[in-house]
Image (spheres, rainbow, N blue to C red):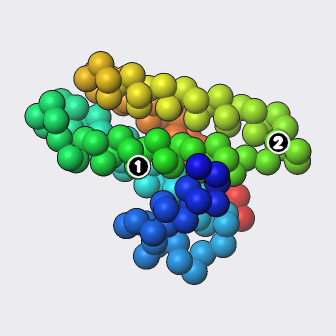
Amino acid sequence: MNYNASMKQYLNNDIASKTSNLNPHKIIEEVLKDLKKNMETLAYSIDNEPVISSIKSQSFSKSLTAIYILQSSLNFDEGKEIAENLFRIYEFCKEGIMNGFTKRDSKLVYEAIPPINEILDGWKQIK
């Protein structure tokens, strides 16, 4: 799946109302916010939902889609070092999400949330 198709699918879901008239910078901010929310939901549901849970599955899927969008949006030509660092952070988060989900260990997901918070805080400061 390419970036544009993923972005279209992602925007067609519940985030669409928040991003329909936004510029690309603001869309990334909304994707980061949504990622954080879905990671928190996933971690909570790992501990508090049955083994098979639609909430857990949906937050897992949305988290991975958001990570894919964020990684696909990186510009390695203009900001090589920053893009590489962000890519590594997103990979760390993706591994925490995937391992936490498969091992049913919410701690792995919770550990991946602070880097997203830091990126989101920094992103909000960029105008």
Locate the C terminus by quadrant: bottom right
User: Which residue: 67% across, 37% down?
Assistant: 86
**94 sits to left or right of 90:** left
- Rate crowding at label 2 as few (under 14), some (14 to 19) or many (20 or more) other CA atoms within 10 Å: few
Q: Of the residues under marks 2 and 1, which one precedes in the sequence?
A: 1
Query: 70 above or below 115?
Result: below
Hey, what amino acid is under mark 2?
A: Phe
**62 sits to left or right of 105:** right
Query: Please, what secondary structure does the residue beneath circle 1 have?
Result: helix
User: Which residue position holds label 2?
Assistant: 76
Q: Residue furthest bottom?
A: 21
- Rate crowding at label 1 as few (under 14), some (14 to 19) or many (20 or more) other CA atoms within 10 Å: many
Q: Nearer the viewer, residue 61 or 83?
A: 61
Q: Nearer the viewer, residue 71 or 82?
A: 71
User: Which residue position holds label 1?
Assistant: 62
Q: Is residue 55 visible?
A: yes
Query: 69 above or below 89?
Result: below
Q: Residue furthest front?
A: 1
Query: Please, what secondary structure does the residue beneath circle 2 have?
Result: loop
**x%, y% of residue 9?**
49, 62
**x%, y% of residue 87?**
67, 35
User: Which residue: 88% across, 45% down?
Assistant: 77
Q: Nearer the viewer, residue 8 or 41?
A: 8
